[in-house]
Image (cartoon, rainbow, N blue to C red):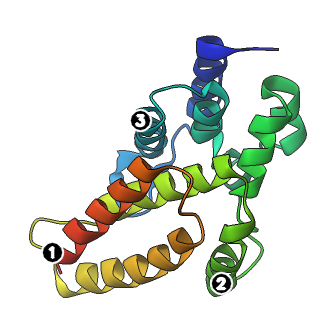
Amino acid sequence: MLTGLRLVCEAAELAARRHSGQQRKSDENEPYINHLAEVVSILAAVTDGADAELVAAGWLHDTIEDTDTSRDELVQRFGVRVADMVEEVTDDMTLAKSERRRRQVKDAPKKSPGAKLIKIADKISNIRVRIFFEPDAGQKEELADYLAWAEQVVKGCRGVNARLDKLFDETVAHAKGTL
């Protein structure tokens, strides 16, 4: 079984390969891997890099949802805990967006501590990419909608890491200041 830095590096490599060519939804000029790197950076910072499996799962958190990667493959390559965290933060893409959002709010309090951390870091990254220097009306509306929903999801994830909770609050306050 891979451990430590090797686990993180192999997760990053797989994520980069599987998400190759994908762009962020809110910025078509930004490679998707930048989102994963930001989520991982947040996770590593707030945990002082103490949990390699968490960081590996951060790299992989969208692989089941957005690529042809399976949970079984993740178990085989990275272990059960990493695969479980990834699976916990994976949306069922066969459902309508409104239902996926509703389920995230409902299921957030039931997630493992690691999945909660990934979920909050993911929301921070997704808020940050929606902040514009001089947003137009559509950008403001989209940001306000995303913020309202993200705050509901994160409400069910709080309490695992005070630094991450504080970073989320600071990110939301900054975003609201742009509206």
Q: Is residue 129 visible?
A: no
Task: Tell me the kind of residue under disc 2.
Answer: Arg
**The disc label shown at residue 41, or none:** 3
In this rendering, would 160 be left or right of 139?
A: right
Instruction: Give coordinates of residue 129: x percent, y percent.
Output: 32, 59
Q: In the image, is residue 149 above or below residue 37?
A: below
What residue is disc 2 on? 102
The residue that appears at 77% across and 52% down in the rendered structure is 87
Instruction: Give coordinates of residue 48: x percent, y percent.
Output: 44, 28
**The disc label shown at residue 114, or none:** none
Instruction: Give coordinates of residue 167: x percent, y percent.
Output: 34, 54
In this rendering, would 158 be left or right of 145?
A: right
Task: Tell me the kind of residue under disc 3.
Answer: Ser
Mark 2 → mark 3, Cα distance in angstroms: 28 Å
Label 2: few (<14), some or many (≥20) within 10 Å? some
Mark 3 and mark 1 in contact (Cβ < 8 Å)?
Answer: no
In this rendering, would 43 be left or right of 115?
A: left
Task: Tell me the kind of residue under disc 1.
Answer: Gly
What SS does tag 2 mark? helix
Q: On the image, which quarter does residue 3 sit in?
A: top right
Q: In the image, is residue 90 above or below residue 32?
A: below
Mark 1 → mark 3, Cα distance in angstroms: 24 Å
Mark 1 and mark 3 lie on one chain; the one further toward the N terminus is: 3
What SS does tag 3 mark? helix
What residue is disc 1 on? 177
Mark 2 and mark 1 lie on one chain; the one further toward the N terminus is: 2
The residue that appears at 41% across and 77% down in the rendered structure is 146
Q: Nearer the viewer, residue 107 or 136?
A: 107
